[in-house]
Image (cartoon, grey):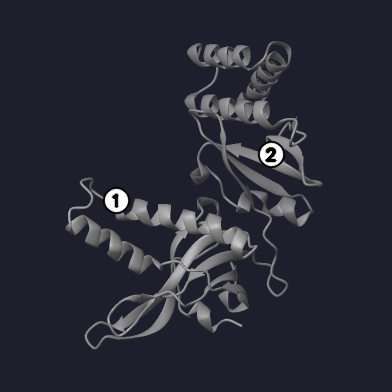
Amino acid sequence: MHPSDKFLLVRKHIFSTFRLHGLTSALNIIDNYRKNNAIDDKHYKGIRAELGFFSSHRKDFGLFESLDSGNHADFIGNIKGSTYGIDVTTNLDFKDLETYTENQKDGYEYLIALVNPDTLKLEEIFNINFPFCADCGGRMIDILYLEPSGCDNEGFINYSYNQRAVAICSFNPEHSISKKETNFMTVDFSSHINDYANNLNFGESLTHIDIKKEIDRYAISNLKFFRKELNSNLMACGFPEYIVTNPHYGEGYNGTKIYFKRPFIKNEVDEIYDFDFRDLL
């Protein structure tokens, strides 16, 4: 028997047990399969996450199991009147937007549900149905663009500036557009990291700071807030970057650096763009 067919039988057994005897019994069955080497660690974590998600949300999302016969979904669900294929994961690094593209072109819509592998609770759910560019067929992915914090003559930060949602075309950045702006107060990445470094230097924190981790944390916090503020499906954060072409003379041009992006769009959004998003119409 092919391993994928064997796993489908295991999955069917687990969900049947859940319906007959409840969550605890089904989780015990999963543990037994792992102890007997019937499933590996990857499938062990995955099926536990699926079961936890199904147990908590089967009624509010109207879930039923998918056989995943090429449709790349663990469940089919209905959310706010729309039907989605829902792919459950404990690690976004394993997901890639390209996996779903062909089915999306045929009209199928998908969500990725991120489940905590320890608590089995839903941490976040992502709508990955990004529009296709009318000009080239690329994906139009919304980016949060944090504009620089200004300073007055005494060096104090001036918060009167804009944040904006920008739709970046994954095939041709020239097709990108500026969608919406807000002047809600927030600090750009450079100012935030400088503040963190100053706090560390002044001894306000006794714990070593992982700058990359702090950037990710700050970016995710902003994405969650501005998703509502801008009514936009934001998936990455960018900031103006002066791109040096001649280090000796300091020559260069104004571009954009992407400080953070969701893993499943890693191949759709570049790290550096050679234009300033503020120039977009």
Residue 267 seen anywhere in this rendered image of the structure: no
Name the residue rendered at 73%, 72% in the picture. 134
Residue 134 seen anywhere in this rendered image of the structure: yes
Amino acid, disc 1: Asp
In the figure, 100 relative to 29: above or below? below
Total count of labels: 2
Q: In the image shown, does 252 or 99 lie closer to the viewer?
A: 252
Name the residue rendered at 53%, 73% in the picture. 183
Q: Residue 113 appears at what percent x and percent y? A: 61, 41
Name the residue rendered at 67%, 24% in the picture. 8
Quick check: marks 1 and 2 in contact, CB under 8 Å? no
- Disc 2 designates what residue? 73
Q: Residue 249 appears at what percent x and percent y? A: 24, 88
In the figure, 226 relative to 276: above or below? above
At label 1, counting other C-alpha atoms closer than 10 Å, the crowd grade (few under 14, some 14-19, many 20 or more) is few
In the figure, 254 relative to 31: above or below? below
Q: Residue 238 appears at what percent x and percent y? A: 47, 68
Q: In the image shown, does 154 or 221 lie closer to the viewer?
A: 154
- Disc 1 designates what residue? 210
| Mark closest to the chain's N terminus, 1 or 2 | 2
Dividing the picture into quadrants, the one containing residue 72 is top right
